[in-house]
Image: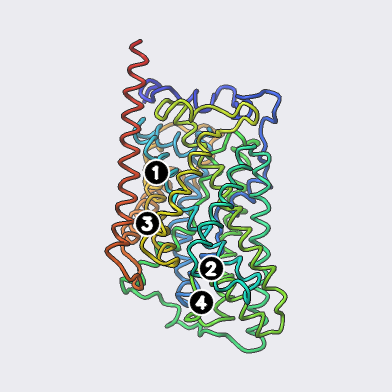
Amino acid sequence: MSDQENGPNLELLSLTGGGVSIAEAQDPNRPKRVMGLRDLVLFYVVTGVSLRWIATAAAAGPSSVVIWLGAWLLFYTPLALSVIELSSRYPNEGGLYVWSKRAFGDFSGFMAAWTYWTSNLPYFPAVLYFAAANVLFMRPAQWSHLSSNATYSIIFSLVTLAAATFLNVVGLDVGKWLHNIGAFAMWIPVLIIIGLGLLAYHRFGSANGFSLHTMTPSLRLNDIIFWSVLAFAFGGCETGSFMAEEIKNPRRIIPLALFVGGLTIAFCYIVGTICVLLALPSSEVSPLQGLVQAIAKTSERVGLPGFLPIAAFLIALSNVGSSGAYLAAVARLPFVAGVDHYLPASFGKLHPRWGTPWVALLTQAVIGAIFIFLGQAGTSVQGAYEVLISMSVISYFIPYLYLFASMFKLQGEPAGDEIIRVPGGRPAAYVLAVVGFAATLLTIALSVLPPPDEPNKALAVCKVVGGCGALVLIGVGLYWAGKRRALRDQAF
């Protein structure tokens, strides 16, 4: 594939000859690369772990532990290894955009970036709804009545989204501290629930039975739908590569950070779920408030109620940090698309003072705010949460189809000694790409189906399919409009 086939060329995205970062492009006096190994590990942890999934898994019972392991092996492992090799081959700003474009051309690169970017529009309300629900446990007696109050959830989501956006507009060197704090805020509640779960087990025994029967996943359709949610929970390890040129020595640091981050993510999910199940019967766990609920009931049982307000605050903070991290990473996708002229030129411009892709950040925040209201329409807070999750899963997993297909296709390109290959070389890479692609397709198919307790299933399906379809069609329209605009500019 020639450079001309790739449109405006990868040099516009990454300046590969000089390795110039976004910050350098705006102001050579700014730090060249602001993300070190510690920052990137914390970034992967805060984007890869969401404490809400521990509650969701525990609500499904002990069999979720096996599903966690399956999702880690069949989805996360192929994904992480593919990201390591692809980011080593092409350590450029934009990550997934660059890989898909290199493999399949302009349209695929744009649509991979567009669907990934738009997937975060329903993601922000979903994760911020979860944060809002957990804040109420800081003072449960006084604030619990707000748990089903849509106005409270909307206001909380809007305020925290605005704060995260502002910090990232100011700069990644500032915004990264929200991500780092969010990662630490996530670890502490996990350690609390592990300690309380073990203490509850020591005093009272396990609240759930762990046996071959209870740990065998059910093959009923409603239970299989749940598998897609846990696969979704393992997404995120590709995000660091979107900011590759703002990472110090990305070829060395990204694999190390993914290894440490991957072990941390698996530990938090699997061990955290086990300890919730030790402390609380699965039938009493709420997917929306489950982890803090487990901490509340367990701390009361063991006589340590003081943990609850601290854990509730930290769980909420970790989710705000996660939303800020995703906001920072995915804003680089419309930025490089703007540089390539497939989006309006303003997307490819940097803030005159802070050197950040501020148009992409603000646009994403505004549309995310609209989704905060749309997700609530015609349903309860719990129903809105479920619809937002389904929309996030589908639109989020479409880019993974491009990623795994690119991994397969790009094996035909030469790889020098500096490239980090998948263990086993090209044959293993093909297998990983096929396994990851199949797991992604299955996840998308399952995510279309509404949860069994959704009162208005037809409305939920229409929201999910219609919302995702509209986003894809908008992306197609923007691409062709940008293509025509570029051809017209060349003619003059």
What's the CA distance linking mark 4 and mark 2?
10 Å
Residue placed under numbered mark 2 in the picture? 54
Q: Nearer the viewer, residue 128 or 38?
A: 128
Answer yes or no: do the residues labelled 2 and 1 have beta carbons within 8 Å? no
What's the CA distance linking mark 1 and mark 4?
32 Å
What's the CA distance linking mark 1 and mark 3?
18 Å
What's the mark number on residue 439? 3
Q: Nearer the viewer, mark 4 or mark 3?
A: 4
Residue placed under numbered mark 1 in the picture? 115
Tell me if mark 1 has few (under 14), some (14-19) or many (20+) residues whose alpha carbon lies within 10 angstroms of its own: many
Q: Nearer the viewer, residue 433 or 296?
A: 296
- Between discs 1 and 3, the one toward the N terminus: 1
What's the mark number on residue 285? 4
Up the image or down, 326 lies above or below 458; here it is above
**Residue 194: x and y, percent?**
64, 73
- Between discs 4 and 3, the one toward the N terminus: 4
